[in-house]
Image (cartoon, rainbow, N blue to C red):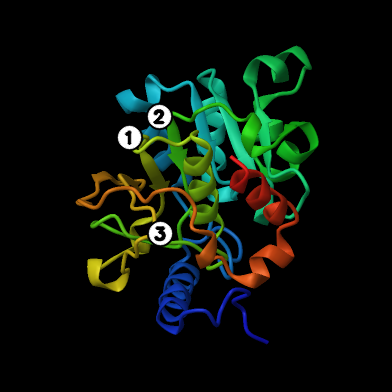
Amino acid sequence: MEKHRWSGRNRLKDNLREEIWRKLESSGTAIGDPWSKIPNFQGAQEAAFKLSEFDFWKASRVVKSNPDRAQAWVRLYALQDGKKIYTPVPELTRDFPFLLLDPEILEKRGITFEEVMYSDGAMLHGQRVNFTEMEPMDICVVGSVAASIAGGRMGKGGGFADLEMGIFRSIGTLSRTCPIVTTISEIQIVENAKISLEAHDTPLDWIITPERAIKSQNTLPQPGPIDWNLMQEDQFLKIPFLRRLREELSRK
């Protein structure tokens, strides 16, 4: 049985993902099984702390973060710093796409931030929100399997991050100046030529590892609103609200 759930769309990308997962596993850098997911890694807390020291982080009020364990410390530090967090339901599999973690509300309810730093606690205690109910975001944190200094990013293959950001731009909650950030291990940084950036791909602005913070060399503009023609049919089948959202946006 193939270990990679999302394989088959692009063989070159599949090969690179498998190479990174294998290196993470064999080196002991991975925490848990890295395969077919955004991998958790040794030093994730240190990378999150480096991010929390940036001026753009300190000035931010609203953070969007992917729900994976690799970015759990990012979410914890954001809540501790009094920031609201929007985090998606894993793989967007519910009728409501996102959860709001509001530190003031959590504290009033007696819920510790540690209880919601991982996706199961966020699902239990977060407020359900739709895309149109979300505030504009000041920082967008995305998970990565691999990233390049040129700003290229590769996720686990499901297309969720680029889908979300395309929707945000269509609605107006993600500006072209919002920093796009990922936290990864050094093993996950690859040569620029290994990740090609297409028109609908969102380039990274910052790559944060436990050892260093890298301003990407990206010179490409952020893409525009979502292009529904690029959607895969299986995405419409597996993501319940997607057809409804497309109809809502087409009426505007």
Q: Which residue is mark 1?
A: 177
Furthest toward the front, the residue is: 251
Q: Nearer the viewer, residue 22 or 239?
A: 239
Give the mark nearest the N terminus, 1 or 3: 1
Q: Position of residue 242 (x, y in %)?
A: 68, 54
Instruction: Name the element at disc 1.
Output: loop
Position of the C terminus, as image quadrant, is top right
Q: Amino acid at mark 2?
A: Ser
Q: Which mark is residue 246?
A: none
- Please give the residue where the numbered disc 2 appears in the rendered image: 52
Residue 107 in the image: above or below residue 86: above
167 to the left or right of 108:
left
Percent of width and height locating residue 145: 45, 62
- Which residue is at a point 32% across and 68% down the rendered structure image? 195
The reply to whether residue 86 is visible in this rendering is yes
Residue pictured at 25% horizontal, 46% vertical: 214
Q: Nearer the viewer, residue 58 or 12?
A: 12
Q: Position of residue 69 (x, y in %)?
A: 59, 49
Report x, y in % for residue 141: 46, 42
To which residue does mark 3 refer?
A: 200
**Res 193 quadrant in image:** bottom left
Q: Nearer the viewer, mark 2 or mark 3?
A: 3
For residue 67, say whether it is visible.
no
